Amino acid sequence: MAASVCISHHLVVLVLLFSCLVVVSSFSLAREAVGPFNSIYSFGDSSSSAADHIAATLSLPSPQPYTQRGTEFFESGLSFATPGTTIMKPFFFLKNGIPPPPQSHELSQISTFMRFFYEDCFSFHDCGRNNKVIPKALIFMDQPGINDYKHAFLHGKSSSEASHLVPVVVETIKNSIERLINEAGAKTLVVSGILPMGCFPGFRTLFPEGDSIGKNRCHRGLNMFSKLHNDHLWQAILELRLKYPDVRIIYADYYKAFMAVLKNHAFLGFKTNNLMKACCGSGNAPFKFDVQKKCGEEGVAVCSDRASYLHWDGFRLTPEALENLMDTLFSKKGFVFPELKVGEETAAAVTRRHSRIHARVGDISYVIRHLLFV
């Protein structure tokens, strides 16, 4: 009787041990880098999940908000994105006759990142320049500057007036990239251009002039403004590549990728009648958008077939549209310069990782069988 109880007790312990070891093995391997990068640090507007799509493409964990994870998770990658964030400081807006937005802070996302890097990473975990944490990470800057322009347009600036802001905004982006390279030791950065503003319901509502509408129903003047910013940004990236030849600065052409999605909208499941409408919005046709009523407020309706819409509200894409945009971006069709090396190498690494998980589980199973039946 005692022997039977003892055997039963050992069986329970072994089963629990097996379960724990499987979980630990899976978790530790899931955290293992399978591609050229170990982690992602993202900057931009937190309303966008673009960083999550890139993480999935690279088989990496999605970067978690730094406000929720704490400094002990710095080495595993973090998101420093905040809602409605601008990259320019309040004085910039005041100087140009624009009320500073509430999201404009003296302490920028880059400064917050550097505070984590120096105080919490370098001091306690020794992940400085000589360590491989940041050099083995992917730095992702998602549409830097877009909210600065949006804020200017919302306060009555024309595209011509806003064009004078572009050189200063792009110079700020350039300085941020240099800081990440020089102070944090960043080796790979993906910097995106901005989307074609003239194809978004929110911006179209602000600029309703009919004579500026192209064949694709987008506003020509606003799209030219987006191209102006992207051209300046591309030139800044070229200059930085010459200055830092050992750093990979990758340009993600959101503009062309979005236009490709727009061109193939029917094939991708987006209805022609919904191309310029907000899924979550109010107001009259053709945009179903009212700048005074935000998505989530009383009286703002949500469409029942979101997957057939490109635009969630006036300024953001639906999850389905964003997924198609990111898939197009990394389709190796010339939307990323130079191409981010993913694909077969990463897929093979994922297979190897799964094989190691199964091998470890097999080893544990063998031990348990040996203890039970020998």
Image (spheres, rainbow, N blue to C red):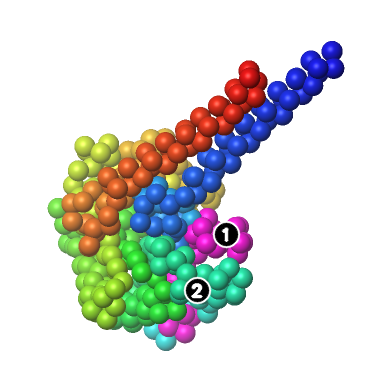
Q: Is residue 217 visible?
A: no
Q: Quadrant of the N terminus?
A: top right
Q: Nearer the viewer, residue 264 or 151?
A: 264
Question: Considering the numbered disc 2 on the image, is that residue within a helix, a strand or a loop?
Answer: loop
C-alpha separation, residue under disc 1 versus residue under disc 2? 15 Å
In terms of secondary structure, where does tag 1 sit? helix
Residue 296 appears left or right of 96:
right
Tell me which segment is drawn in magenta: 64-93
The reply to whether the magenta stretch includes residue 78 is: yes
Q: Name the residue: 58% across, 41% down.
A: 24
Q: Residue at x 43, y 57 (%)?
A: 38
Which of 373/349 is in front?
373
Precedes in sequence: disc 1 or disc 2: 1
Which amino acid does the dot numbered 2 rest on?
Answer: Gly
Furthest residue in direction bottom, as rendered: 95
Q: Residue at x 33, y 81 (%)?
A: 171
Q: Residue furthest top?
A: 1
Q: Is residue 342 a member of the stretch shown in magenta?
A: no
Who's the residue at 25% across and 39% down the image?
Answer: 268
Q: Quadrant of the C terminus?
A: top right
Badge 2 is on which residue?
128
Which mark identifies residue 115? none
